[in-house]
Structure formats: C-alpha cells, structure tokens
Amino acid sequence: MSIRKLKAAIRDVPDFPKPGILFKDITTILKDPVLFRAAIDLFAKRHKDKGIKKVAVIDARGFLFGSALAYKLKAGLVPIRKKGKLPYRTFEESYDLEYGSATLAVHEDAFEPGEPVLLIDDLLATGGTAQASARLIERAGGKVVEIDFLIELGFLKGREKLTAYSVFAPIVF
Ligand code: AMP
C-alpha cells in the first residue's frame, strides 16, 4: 500500500467547519479496512521495537489512529483532552486559535518520570495543538520521542512551532 493511495483517499470538504477552511476528511480512510490498516502500519513499522512506552493521543481524531497504534506497539494510551473532560487532577495548557483560544488537559499521573512517549494527531495545521500537547506531556514527566501526524498542511508552517521535537508526517498537502 502506497502513501499515494492513502493521500488520494483523503476527502476535501470546502468551507467546513466554517467558510474558507478546506477540511481534510479522514473518515474515508477509516471506513476502508485496507487503507485504515495501512495507515496504522505506517506508524507501527516506524516505531516497532523502539521502546515507546506510551502513545499520547489528541482529542478527537488523534484517538482514532493512536489507540490502534498503541495496541500494535504494546504501549499504553494517554488521552489529551479538551478542558473539562478528564475526571482526575490535570495539567492544562492554553493556546491561540485563529479566533480566541483553546485549552487542553492531561492527567497529572499519566506518565512515569522520563518514559518515552509518542504523540499522535491526524493533522498538523498551525501546530498550536501539538505544541500545547507536547508541553503537557513534559509537565506530566514524559519524554516526547516524536510527534506524528498522518497529514501535514505544509503551507501553514506548523513545524516552525515544533522545532524542539522530531516530527513525522507522511502525507503533505
Ligand atoms: P493546529 O493547532 O492549527 O495545528 O490544528 C490542528 C488540529 O485541528 C488537529 O487536531 C486537526 O484535526 C484540526 N485541523 C486543523 N485544520 C484542519 C483541516 N484543514 N482539516 C482537518 N482538520 C484540521
């Protein structure tokens, strides 16, 4: 299965969730058994036997890829969620959006000190979400080994916010 086939399957939805945004819809990959497996295997091969102890997944589409990946890597799974969703004590990080701001949270006891963590989301846009998530992992004691996305919107230069980290994104628009 080639990356080209995965890329071709991503559906562009104009003006969602608001005018001017071209939304990259990955449900077209999720619903296809061959493509979904291929997407997970892409990351699983990359990190197999590399000592990843936890996969941290970003609310909400990061959950879809990251949980299958954690299972495959025999790693634990840690959700990074929008503020107010996690039940126990949390660390929180706020970051700027195009309009206003957002806050993400992680449980304080999600990681063992210094343990290797892989951070996963579906798509890298401006990088604010991933940057805040990486900070949360660090505040909770984890070590960010890499930040992986299925898709990168290169023209938004999100990597510039993530220069402190190794970043991998096989599909670039
Ligand atoms: P950012 O913080 O700008 O990098 O935004 C990344 C987050 O927003 C990810 O969780 C993506 O799922 C979502 N996102 C941003 N832009 C798009 C887009 N054009 N298509 C699909 N998802 C997007």
Image (cartoon, rainbow, N blue to C red):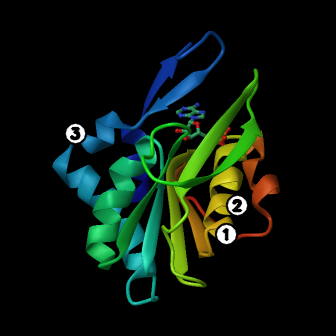
The amino acid type, in three-letter code, at marker 1 is Glu
In the image: residue 43, left or right of residue 96: left
The location of residue 166, given as percent across then percent down, is 67, 72
Residue displayed at 75% across by 40% down: 95
Q: Residue furthest left?
A: 33
In the image: residue 70, left or right of residue 148: left
Q: Using the image as rendered, state which of residue 75 and residue 170 is in the foreground.
A: 75
The amino acid type, in three-letter code, at marker 2 is Arg
Residue corresponding to mark 3: 31
Indicate the quadrant containing the C terminus: top left, top right, bottom left or bottom right: top right
Q: Using the image as rendered, state which of residue 171 and residue 16 is in the foreground.
A: 16
The amino acid type, in three-letter code, at marker 3 is Lys
Residue corresponding to mark 2: 135
In the image: residue 152, left or right of residue 32: right
Query: Could you give the CA–CA distance between mark 3 and mark 1, rounded to whole angstroms?
Result: 34 Å
The location of residue 140, given as percent across then percent down, is 61, 68
Residue displayed at 55% across by 63% down: 108
Look at the numbered discs 1 and 2 and tell me whether their residues touch, using CB distance below 8 Å.
Answer: yes
Looking at the rendered structure, the secondary structure element under dot 1 is: helix
